[in-house]
Image (cartoon, rainbow, N blue to C red):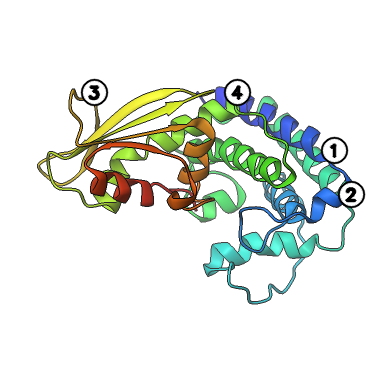
Amino acid sequence: MLGHLVDVWERATADVVALLRSLGPDDWDRPTDLPGWDVRAVASHLAHLESELAGNPQQQVEVPEAAHVRGLMGQFTEAGVVARAGWTTDAVVDELESSVATRLAGLRADPPTDASAPGPGFAGLIGWSWRTLLSNRPLDVWVHEQDVRRAVGRPGGLDSPAAAHVVDVLARALPFVLGKKVGAEPGRSVRLVVTGEQPLDVAAVVGPDGRGVRCDVPEAPTATLEMDTETFVVRSSGRRDAADLTVAVSGDPDLARRVLDALATTP
């Protein structure tokens, strides 16, 4: 399982490096869906995290106050962007590519065997296991690749192994969204249908204890949401508000709206 996640991450990083290498000079300053971040900032963030995990020393910088910088994790993330603000774009991509190569060589030579053991570097400090880290990296890389693609108007990559991984991970949060975030009553259910490149049809129901659980698709779910792959990713990753997206809804419109509003589960 861990080896498969490494394979997916390797392909995802190769794809985003190729995309970044192909950008024109004007593309790097284009704003993304992430508040305060342009394409350059997204690339710098990816380079920073892979460099950290590769064990490279990091420049210590002061992070200015900004509306999009929240909490210690937000400051840590922004520090990587600030530290690379004066770099050339080639230097940012070079660091990303070389850091990935270093990490990949290490993971191939000495693969982790205990998925529940603390991950290295910042991952261990925030309580992530190897399983969580290796699942998160292709998710983070691919979702940011999509941020760049939307910013520069070059859609693609929705049929990749990383896309399949991301859709699967995000869909697993449906019971949590329904039971915990929405607080739906016991017995209420929601069906999620994703069409296009990464199709899926899943459902969740709230049990007697108020917790959401995965279930077989019921004959008559309380509410059904249907959207294409890109829309599901954009909403589940919190990139755009539900009101700005095209989603087909049936059943209880109030529950459907509440689930859609709460669907974002990434940091």
Image x and y of residue 101, in percent: 77, 34
Q: Earlier in the sequence, mark 4 or mark 3?
A: 4
Precedes in sequence: disc 4 or disc 1: 1
**N-term mark: 3 or 1:** 1
Instruction: Read off the residue under disc 1.
Output: 21
Residue that mark 2 sits on: 25
Measured as percent of width and height from the top left, residue 215 is found at: 23, 28
The amino acid type of the residue labelled 2 equals: Pro
Question: Real-space Cα distance between discs 3 and 1?
Answer: 44 Å
Disc 4 crowd, CA 10 A, few/some/many (<14, 14-19, 20+):
few
Per the rendering, the mark at residue 159 is 4
Q: Earlier in the sequence, mark 4 or mark 2?
A: 2
Residue at 57% from the left image edge and 29% from the top image edge: 163
In the picture of the structure, the residue carrying the numbered disc 3 is 216
Is residue 113 or residue 184 the one in the foreground? Answer: 184
The Cα atoms of the two marked residues, 4 and 1, are separated by 20 Å
Q: CA distance from mark 4 to mark 3?
A: 26 Å
Q: In the image as oriented, which residue stretches furthest toward the left?
A: 208
User: Where residue 212 sits: x, y (%)?
Assistant: 23, 41
- Name the residue at 68% across, 72% down: 63
Residue contact at pointers 2 and 3, CB within 8 angstroms: no
Discs 4, 2 touching: Cβ within 8 Å: no
Distance from disc 4 to disc 2, alpha carbons, whole Å, reads 27 Å
- Categorize mark 1 by other alpha carbons within 10 Å: few (<14), some (14-19), many (20+): few
Nearer to us: label 2 or label 1: 2
